[in-house]
Amino acid sequence: MLKKSVPIGLLVCLSFLNGCGSPSAVPLIVRSQGPYVIGDRGPTGGWIIHDKGNEADGWRYLEAAPEDQTPLSWRHQGLMPWGCNGKTIPGARYTTIGTGMRNTSAILRECEEPDTAARMCANYRGGDKDDWFLPSLDELNAIYRHLHKHDLGGFGLGEYWSSSETSKGYAWYYNFTNGKQLYCNKWPKHRVRCVRAFSETPDAPLQPIPVSAIPPVPLTAPGPLPKGRVLE
């Protein structure tokens, strides 16, 4: 989908758009510089899902990857577990916008399981970037509201993992079929869409995440497993 005008940008032809040599190819407009608005294509060809309006902590925008990191399959082939089922990771209990990177760092530090949703994002190199992470619950909600509900981003139906753990050792996920946020054990295999935080200022370093950055009180403290809640 093309926006009506782009004052500063870079035209990039991608292979899935039939190639640059084809007269039917539609160029994808990737904005190489900001400012960006939600729904713009970001510098890696992904989708802008959040603008916090300033560059505190070394970032301003959140960009979702241009495609899922797991295949669009209903048979769970290639999908990923959250990982380390039965192990609690208190440092991954943040749910708000801007905390997915912190959660992912804690998961990688505490969970040595090789094939997990968080590790898939850490290993992703979309746009030649190595700063991708598994989104927090609210970051995943922004993806659902700003992209999926507007038919942007090519999302599949079914469940997507967040990086947010609950106080009971479960993990939150988002069902893109019905808009429900739920949590469950960490062994089921769900879809993964990674996110990165970046600054409008070139080469502005992200602030490092302290190893001891663990919330003193669980930020999400649910009781029994819920039936789910529908978000508008």
Image: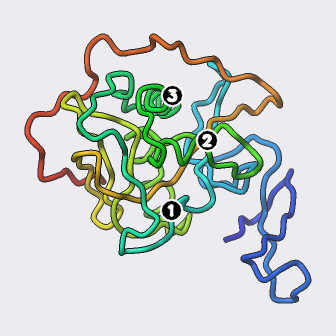
| 210 in relation to 176, above or below | above
What amino acid is at disc 2?
Trp
User: Dot 3: what SS?
Assistant: helix
Q: Quadrant of the C terminus?
A: bottom left
Q: Quadrant of the N terminus?
A: bottom right
User: Dot 1: what SS?
Assistant: loop
Mark closer to the chain start, 2 or 1: 1
What amino acid is at disc 1?
Thr
The residue identified by callout 2 is 132
Q: Which mark is residue 70?
A: 1
Q: Nearer the viewer, residue 200 or 124?
A: 124
What amino acid is at disc 3?
Ser
The residue identified by callout 3 is 105
User: Dot 2: what SS?
Assistant: loop
In the current view of this chain or complex, which residue is farthest to the left?
Answer: 224
Q: How is the image coloured?
A: rainbow
In the current view of this chain or complex, which residue is farthest to the bottom?
Answer: 23
Q: Nearer the viewer, residue 9 or 176?
A: 176
| 144 in relation to 215, above or below | below
